């Protein structure tokens, strides 16, 4: 989240981060400037944990600020990696907030270290500031452009100096990034829901391959690389909030279409449709309407527990899955239930939910998944970096059904998923479903694709997971 030109820039950034909390729960931070220096408040935990004293905003002076909530996919979940990262360069102080993941980070880091660079973090985000500091371009936008041409992968970025805010997006547009306004102020955010909360007006998406400079001169745009669209379809399936406009369209509308197509592809004789709240709600509504079944609220989610998928600890994922949901027995007892889930990554949460439904007296459980099986790692910013973690990478849908202990399990097809985006084919990255990666992988990342193919190991791993849940 970034705000330029508002007397309460830090407070607005803080509110925006609340709306974006679903995108990261490990740490939060804000950096502001009044044109003389950069000021920062950063820490581990949720936004409310880090910003727990209003006096902190007295420190965050100025009418310009950027903020970040972190969900680590590269670099440890430690205080040193909390963003925005703040550095001192030869051209003055600079801060950066990054959403995404770089596929050539290791090679670039080794090259820079061999040339004498000293890194303070193990995050790929620090590469941007090292590359910028080495550039001989005369403007900050020029230095950023030179740096971005050297990195590969997914990145939506906000930079702030004493005088300028820079907004940039990778040429593939993997991660969302939008631009808006509030009065005379310019606002940038990962999702439009952050603008809604701050009463800002959405103007447009930042184009893939675009750098926008906001300063006293106004708003200046340049294309530093040609666009080659491969937007992350998992943003529409799970990650973004349904009330956001992402990649130029309504997330809610696209999730309803996912459910509708799923109902057409995988009908079942049942009594009611329920969702795994909250990310599956709209897909379940779409399924129920298309199937002519009644949609019911069968599971109540404890909203004081975070999103288990993005919690960094496997132990805490398992613990959270046990206490996150409670059944509405009066709705479920003696019913044949269609349970709509947005995706199955590791399968641990869904296994526990199936047990909860059985104990509530459900007669039949039919799971319908509003996405295809996730069989391949993501190297562009989602937290499933190895095949070992993906249940569909080493089990067939029938094996997964047996593991979950349900009556039927059906996934949406890749074709059905892409049809729900309302866009022409080829605009989305679906590598986690198809294994077709739009950006070349490093040697180390390529090796991960062939790991854990041994079926004997796969069966042993499945049995270990089942034992851990009993």
Image (spheres, rainbow, N blue to C red):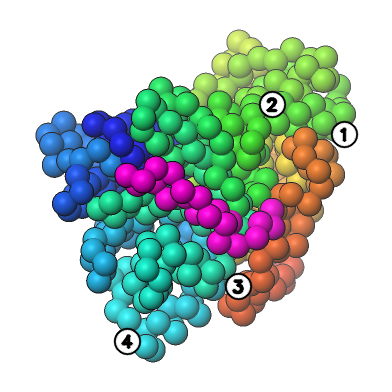
- Evaluate if marks 2 and 3 touch, with contact meaning CB atoms under 8 Å apart: no
Q: For marks 2 and 3, give the CA distance.
A: 34 Å
Q: Which residue is mark 2?
A: 253
Structural crowding at the residue carrying mark 2, measured as other residues with C-alpha within 10 Å and reported as few (<14), some (14–19) or many (≥20): some
| Circle 3/circle 4 CB separation < 8 Å | no
- The residues tagged by marks 3 and 1 sit, at their Cα atoms, a distance apart of 34 Å
User: Residue at coordinates 24% horizontally, 45% vertically from top-left?
Assistant: 32
| Mark drawn on residue 445 | 3
Tell me whether circle 2 and circle 4 mark residues in contact (CB < 8 Å). Answer: no
Q: Nearer the N terminus, badge 3 or badge 4? A: 4
* Kind of element beneath mark 2: helix
Which portion, as a residue range, is magenta?
209-229
Residue at the image point whose x is 76% and y is 19% from the top = 288
- What's the CA distance linking mark 2 and mark 1? 19 Å
Q: Which mark is residue 116?
A: 4
Quadrant location, the C terminus: top right
Quarter assignment of residue 49: top left
- Of the numbered discs 1 and 4, the one sitting upstream in the chain is 4
Q: From the viewer's perspective, tell me whether residue 192 is left or right of residue 282.
A: left
Whichever of labels 3 and 1 marks the residue nearer the N terminus, that label is: 1
Badge 1: residue crowd in 10 Å (few <14, some 14–19, many ≥20)? some
Indicate which label's residue lies in the foreground, 2 or 3: 2
Q: Earlier in the sequence, mark 2 or mark 1?
A: 2
The answer to whether residue 26 of the structure is visible from this angle is no
Looking at the image, which is closer to me, 65 or 379? Answer: 65
Residue at figure coordinates x 47%, y 78% from the top left: 108
Query: Is residue 393 on the magenta stretch?
Result: no
x and y, in percent, of residue 260 in the image:
79, 26
């Amino acid at each position: 989240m970034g705000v330029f030109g508002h007397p309460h820039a830090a407070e607005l950034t803080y509110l925006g981060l609340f709306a974006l909390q679903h995108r990261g729960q490990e740490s939060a931070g804000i950096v502001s400037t009044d044109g003389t220096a950069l000021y920062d408040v950063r820490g581990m935990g949720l936004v409310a944990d880090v910003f727990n004293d209003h006096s902190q905003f007295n420190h965050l002076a100025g009418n310009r600020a950027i903020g970040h909530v972190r969900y680590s996919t590269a670099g440890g979940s430690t205080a040193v990696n909390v963003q925005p990262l703040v550095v001192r360069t030869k051209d003055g102080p600079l801060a950066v907030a990054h959403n995404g993941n770089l596929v050539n980070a290791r090679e670039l880091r080794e090259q820079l270290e061999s040339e004498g660079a000293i890194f303070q973090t193990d995050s790929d985000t620090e590469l941007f500031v090292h590359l910028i500091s080495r550039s001989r371009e005369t403007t900050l936008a020029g230095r950023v452009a030179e740096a971005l041409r050297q990195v590969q992968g997914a990145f939506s970025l906000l930079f702030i100096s004493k005088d300028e805010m820079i907004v940039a997006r990778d040429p593939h547009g993997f991660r969302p990034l939008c631009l808006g306004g509030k009065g005379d102020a310019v606002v940038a955010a990962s999702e439009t829901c952050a603008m809604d909360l701050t009463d800002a007006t959405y103007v447009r998406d930042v184009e893939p391959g675009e750098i926008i400079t906001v300063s006293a001169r106004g708003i200046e745009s340049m294309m530093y690389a040609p666009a080659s669209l491969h937007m992350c379809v998992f943003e529409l399936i799970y990650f973004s909030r349904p009330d956001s406009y992402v990649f130029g369209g309504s997330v809610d509308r696209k999730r309803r279409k996912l459910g509708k197509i799923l109902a057409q592809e995988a009908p079942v004789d049942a009594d009611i449709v329920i969702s795994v709240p909250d990310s599956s709600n709209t897909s379940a509504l779409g399924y129920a309407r298309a199937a002519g079944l009644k949609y019911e609220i069968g599971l109540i989610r404890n909203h004081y527990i975070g999103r288990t998928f993005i919690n960094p600890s496997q132990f805490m994922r398992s613990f959270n899955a046990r206490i996150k949901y409670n059944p509405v027995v009066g709705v479920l007892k003696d019913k044949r239930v269609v349970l709509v889930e947005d995706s199955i990554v590791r399968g641990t949460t869904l296994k526990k939910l199936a047990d909860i439904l059985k104990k509530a007296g459900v007669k039949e459980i039919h799971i319908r998944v509003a996405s295809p099986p996730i069989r391949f790692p993501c190297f562009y910013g989602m937290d499933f970096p190895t095949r070992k973690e993906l249940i569909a990478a080493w089990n067939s849908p029938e094996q997964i059904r047996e593991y979950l202990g349900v009556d039927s399990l059906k996934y949406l097809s890749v074709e059905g998923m892409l049809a729900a985006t309302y866009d022409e084919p080829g605009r989305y990255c679906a590598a986690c479903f198809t294994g077709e990666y739009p950006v070349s992988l490093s040697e180390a990342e390529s090796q991960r694709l062939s790991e854990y193919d041994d079926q004997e190991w796969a069966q042993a791993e499945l049995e270990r997971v089942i034992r851990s849940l009993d």
